[in-house]
Amino acid sequence: MKKSIRFSIVSLLFLSQFINAQQVRDFVIEPPIKPNLYIYKTFGVFGGKEYSTNAMYLITKKGVVLFDVPWQKTQYQSLMDTIQKRHNLPIIAVFATHSHEDRAGDLSFYNKKGIKTYATAKTNELLKKEGKATSTEITKIGKPYRIGGEEFIVDFLGEGHTKDNVVVWFPKYNILDGGCLVKSRSATDLGYTGEANVKQWPETMAKLKTKYAKATMVVPGHDEWKGGGHVEHTLELLNKK
């Protein structure tokens, strides 16, 4: 009897997760913000509410570099297929900006396909602790990556949303991918702070604001990314804590 009850509960949980996954919207590739630089949005449910995640990819002569994976693992292959069809180029590298499901996700998918995956030593440490796949390569902080005529720099400015959150700077375009370190100006709170360093976060944001003062666009990790004021709004939300 107990086994039957336990089986029923497990079955219901699985069915609930399946239904939730089916209800989540498919990814959306936004119009290019620069000729070779794109934002794509994926969706997930947290606390019963749907949220959008902003991630990016860069078109190079050698292939496509993906910055963060789709929130839903079921969309990994379809995003790859769509990018291949749209740009006639394969994904050749994946960079994770931190260890969460909407960023690093399950790197084993890409590892098995022979695609190079990159994460910082700290991110890999957290992934390993959670029993998840680690990257095949260690991200070099502050070193320019030059691939197929394009350039970007992965930078760690300090703890904030997580201990391992990094940003990506595209010097050719003066655009900063702020990841989940930066909140959208439409955000009403700091979101998930279970692994945040709220005390250090304002200091990290101050460094970002100074170091990347030339940025013409800072892309936040979630919600509305268009327009400006995301950095300032993040500081306002932090000041309320």
Image (tube, helix red, strand yellow):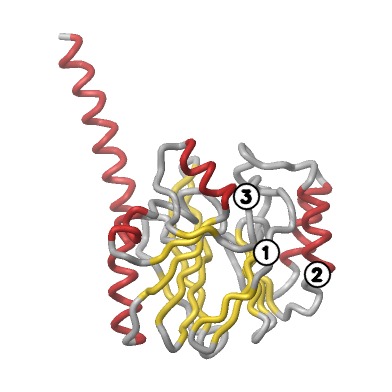
Q: Residues within 10 Å of mark 1 (few under 14, many from 20)?
A: many
Q: Nearer the viewer, residue 226 or 65?
A: 65
Residue placed furthest toward the top: 1
The mark that comes first in sequence, 1 or 2, is: 1
Residue 211, numbered label:
2
- Marks 1/3: CA–CA distance: 11 Å
Residue 48, numbered label:
none
Q: Is the residue under label 2 in contact with that under label 3 (CB below 8 Å)?
A: no
Q: Position of residue 28 (x, y in %)?
A: 41, 71
Q: Which residue is mark 1?
A: 155
Q: Position of residue 87 (x, y in %)?
A: 36, 86
Where is the N terminus found, in terms of image quarters? top left
| Residue in view at x 42 percent, y 56 percent | 71
- Marks 3/2: CA–CA distance: 18 Å
The mark that comes first in sequence, 3 or 2, is: 3
From the viewer's perspective, tell me whether residue 166 is left or right of residue 53.
right
Q: Position of residue 31 (x, y in %)?
A: 48, 83
Q: Nearer the viewer, residue 75 or 171?
A: 171
| Residue in view at x 38 percent, y 51 percent | 106
The mark that comes first in sequence, 1 or 3, is: 1
| Residue in view at x 50 percent, y 55 percent | 51
User: Which secondary structure lies at badge 1?
Assistant: strand
Identify residue type, mark 1: Asp
| Residue in view at x 81 percent, y 74 percent | 213
Residue 164, numbered label:
3
Identify the image quadrant of residue 29.
bottom left
Q: Residues within 10 Å of mark 2 (few under 14, many from 20)?
A: few
User: Which secondary structure lies at badge 3?
Assistant: loop
